[in-house]
Image (tube, rainbow, N blue to C red):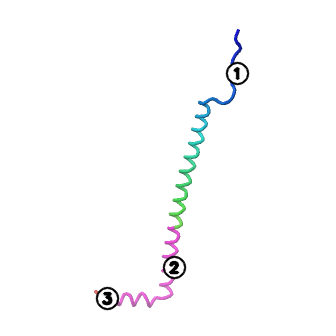
Amino acid sequence: MKRPVTQRGVGLLELMLSLLVILTLIFMATRYFLISRESLRVSQAVDMINTTVNASYKWLEGNPDFLISVCRHYKQLV
């Protein structure tokens, strides 16, 4: 009678499946990181534009003569 063969170590199929799982997780994490980084850049750009627009409105409130002079020059051009 033969003895049953005991398995030693990790088989090639098990190794390949574990590598596939690891690579899938790395791929998903990389995609998430890239998307979140791009989203952060867009939101920062929008915040900068809003800050610039609000600053220009505040400047115009403090300098109403500038807007009037621009309108006068525009009427002269037209």
Which callout, 2 or 1, points at the residue further toward the start of the chain? 1
Q: Nearer the viewer, residue 57 or 43?
A: 43
Whether the residues at callouts 2 and 1 have beta carbons within 8 Å, the answer is: no
Residue at figure coordinates x 70%, y 11% from the top left: 2
The quarter of the rendered structure image containing the C terminus is: bottom left
Residue at figure coordinates x 53%, y 66% from the top left: 44
Q: Nearer the viewer, residue 40 or 62?
A: 40
The magenta stretch spans residue 23: no
Residue 15 falls in which quadrant of the image? top right
Mark 3 crowd level (few <14, some 14–19, many ≥20, 10 Å Cα): few
What is the x, y in percent for residue 24? 56, 42
Residue 66 falls in which quadrant of the image? bottom left
Residue tagged by mark 1? 6
Residue tagged by mark 3? 75
Residue tagged by mark 2? 55
**What span is colored magenta in the figure?**
45-74
The quarter of the rendered structure image containing the N terminus is: top right
What is the x, y in percent for residue 70? 38, 88
- Label 1, label 3: how far apart the Cα atoms are: 96 Å
Give the residue type at disc 2: Ala
